[in-house]
Image (cartoon, rainbow, N blue to C red):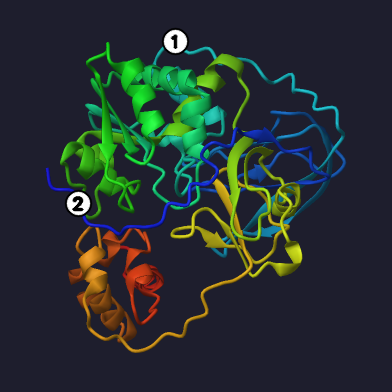
Amino acid sequence: MRKLKGIKLKHRKNTENSVTVQLPLPSKIILPMSMHMGVPCTPLVRKGDTVKIGQKIGDCEAPFSVPVHSSVSGTVTAINDYQTSMGTVCKAVEIEPDGKQDISDEIQPPVITDKESFIKAIRESGACGMGGAGFPTHIKLNPAKEIDTLIINAAECEPYITSDYREMIENTDDVLKGIRLVKDILGIKSVKIAIEKNKPEAIKKFEELTKPDSAFDIVTLPSVYPQGAEKVIIYNTTNRIVEEGKLPADVGVIVINVSTVAFIYRYTQTGIPFITRRITVEGNAVREPKNIFAPIGTPFADILNFCNTDIDKLKAVISGGPMMGMCIPDINMPVLKTTNALLAFDHYDDRKTSACIRCGRCADVCPINLMPAEIDKAYRIKDIDDLKALKVLLCMNCGSCTYICPANRKLAETNQLAKTIIPKN
């Protein structure tokens, strides 16, 4: 099967052998009511309230939403407006930990008897995608279409990030039990665990443990970015194409991140909701790179200090990977449900942008065969018909075009802006 195009990157997986360590309890927790794709939650607590670990502090009646839970025990000190990375505003609950880490009386393992109770439990867990935009997991696991293949996204193709890899190595049993739980409850016949070939220990481990089960297939992906993008991983594991405007379920597939599926198993056993994240902390301003467990809501500053980062020399801090992550304007912003890495650098790319030289490299590396230079041209003259014909809505914002451009043109960013001017209907 022909593999899709992409780019070769230096992996810089320097923390791949760094066993995950626990971050000390921070002095403050900030929990935005919007950490997932969909409708923001409404706070269920007030200033002065006492909360405990796992207590639900935000929820919404909208189906396309997930609740927010406290990651610490302590006192609510404020409820303020919070601007998300997408520019929208939601409420955020600030909590001062009391150091006791008392667990809420609400915490009980869910009773799961069928698919309906399983989906309800997943929603109550607060789970959303850990490897992407935060798509609510209960929606993903309840498609209207028949599903025959479950793809476990263990590619982790961005440089630096090793948090999913450590999940596979440290919690292999949880991963496999989570996969079998989802497979059996949803009645899915085939499972494909997709891992980039630069993770040989994980590949060997999962091949050995799944060998007796013919339903499992360990797919070794080329180390070419962006293997972890949803459309790419579906094609490279099943040869199926998700067309414009369609979802993975339309081709009989569910894709779920490896850390998400491990969390699902643990939640069914303990009832502890989604309140902690494993995060890779790296970059040349970080003196002690680590993989850490941090309560969701922890200010990034606490994490950077824990890893002995040279704060005074910081020029760029990225939440996520260097290709698809977001530069953060303030290190006091918090860890979100979607945070899998924090990268800190003492320099940034300040190359000047020049005119397009028509080299075609952007089109050569695009994994879904778009023409970024032509999209850029159409966007600048606001030619909506041309943008539609150029299929800009298919762009997954992997950043390959921007990375490869010798003129340093921000092509991936332009693609995202172009999407916003195309009418919804």
**Residue 336 location, x and y as percent?**
61, 47
Q: Residues within 10 Å of mark 2 (few under 14, many from 20)?
A: few
In the picture, measured across the screen, residue 9 lies left or right of residue 290, that is: left
Q: Nearer the viewer, mark 2 or mark 1?
A: 2
Residue position for label 1:
113
In the picture, measured across the screen, residue 46 lies left or right of residue 425, that is: right
Depicted 415 relative to depicted 295: above or below: below
Tag 1's secondary structure? Answer: loop
Q: Verify CB contact (< 8 Å) between mark 2 and mark 1.
A: no
* Residue located 38% across and 88% down the image: 354
Q: Quadrant of residue 249?
A: top left
Q: Amino acid at mark 1?
A: Thr
**Residue 86 location, x and y as percent?**
53, 62
In the picture, measured across the screen, residue 24 lies left or right of residue 320, that is: right
Q: Quadrant of residue 396?
A: bottom left
Residue that extends furthest to the left in the rendered view of this protein:
1
Figure disc tally = 2
Whether residue 370 is visible: no
- 352 or 134, which is in the foreground? 352
**Residue 337 location, x and y as percent?**
57, 43
- 155 or 201, which is in the foreground? 201
Whether residue 389 is visible: yes
- 223 or 331, which is in the foreground? 223
Q: CA separation, marks 2 and 1?
A: 35 Å
Name the quarter where the N terminus is drawn: top left
* Residue located 65% across and 60% down the image: 285
Residue position for label 2:
243
Tag 2's secondary structure? Answer: loop
- 324 or 1, which is in the foreground? 1
**Residue 202 location, x and y as percent?**
40, 30
- Residue 238 is labelled as none
